Image (cartoon, rainbow, N blue to C red):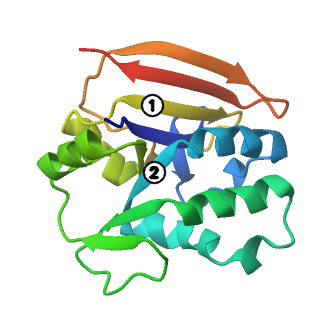
């Protein structure tokens, strides 16, 4: 059985995007990217909302990372190897391998995916993650807190939902980013 993991890079004040929709302040350096690669290597299936999928499609074309560092190129390989499920009512077709579209987010279907999985699953995108969190599906939270205040935008975590968490791991990086890994408790 796989765990469903929500991983997000967030500002210290809790946003994944600023008020203008920018997230350039969240770009990981090679140290952080290598760490993320080690975590992502364990993921067999990514669950994305349309907007996050469209952002992540960048990694599908090896030419996009050819001039990047070894960590950047490796992330592209990891992303291309994973299965991807995109939840969208409007997306007509996908442009990446091992990707399918689901029109509705069905918590029971995700539970079945978790039960049948031989590797972990991740949920990407704050809005889709909020839906999964509200349904009680997220087993672990991997938060990378960047030392910046952006003052508003898209929240990393939903409001109005209570989940008790246990700290499982923590770390820090040379750029000041802090890693927090929490497990949901019952």
Q: Is residue 139 above or below residue 101?
A: above
Q: Secondary structure at mark 2?
A: strand
Q: Quadrant of the C terminus?
A: top left
Relative depth, front residue between 130 and 59? 59
Q: Residues within 10 Å of mark 1 (few under 14, many from 20)?
A: many
Relative depth, front residue between 11 and 83? 83
Which numbered dot is residue 141?
A: 1
Horizontal and vertical percent position of residue 47: 37, 56
Query: Residue at (82%, 39%) from the top-left corner?
Result: 31
Residue 35 seen in this snapshot:
yes
Horizontal and vertical percent position of residue 132: 27, 43
Residue 21 seen in this snapshot:
no
148 on left or right of 124: right
Relative depth, front residue between 86 and 9? 86
183 on left or right of 145: left
Query: Residue at (33%, 38%) from the top-left corner?
Result: 158
Horizontal and vertical percent position of residue 172: 74, 24
Farthest residue to the bottom: give it.
92
Q: Residues within 10 Å of mark 2 (few under 14, many from 20)?
A: some
List the residue tagged with mark 2. Answer: 44
* Corner quadrant of residue 50: bottom left
Question: How much space separates mark 1 and mark 2, taking CA atoms?
Answer: 17 Å
Relative depth, front residue between 39 and 117? 117
Q: Earlier in the sequence, mark 1 or mark 2?
A: 2
142 on left or right of 63: left
Q: Are marks 1 and 2 in contact (CB under 8 Å)?
A: no
Q: Is residue 103 above or below residue 124?
A: below
Q: Nearer the viewer, mark 1 or mark 2?
A: 2
């Amino acid at each position: 059985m796989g765990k469903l993991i929500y991983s997000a890079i967030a500002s210290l004040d809790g946003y994944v995007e600023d008020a203008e929709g920018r997230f350039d302040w969240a770009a990981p350096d090679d140290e952080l990217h290598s760490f993320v690669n080690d975590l992502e290597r364990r993921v067999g299936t990514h669950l994305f909302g349309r907007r996050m999928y469209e952002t992540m499609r960048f990694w599908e074309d090896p030419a996009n990372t050819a001039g990047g560092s070894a960590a950047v190129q490796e992330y592209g390989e990891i992303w291309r190897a994973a299965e991807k499920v995109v939840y969208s009512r409007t997306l007509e077709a996908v442009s990446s391998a091992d990707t399918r579209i689901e029109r509705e987010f069905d918590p029971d279907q995700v539970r079945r995916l978790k039960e049948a999985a031989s590797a972990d699953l991740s949920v990407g995108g704050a809005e889709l993650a909020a839906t999964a969190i509200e349904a009680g599906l997220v087993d672990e939270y991997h938060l990378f807190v960047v030392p910046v205040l952006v003052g508003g935008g898209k929240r990393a975590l939903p409001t109005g939902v209570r989940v008790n968490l246990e700290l499982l791991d923590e770390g820090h990086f040379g750029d000041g980013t802090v890693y927090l890994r929490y497990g949901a408790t019952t």
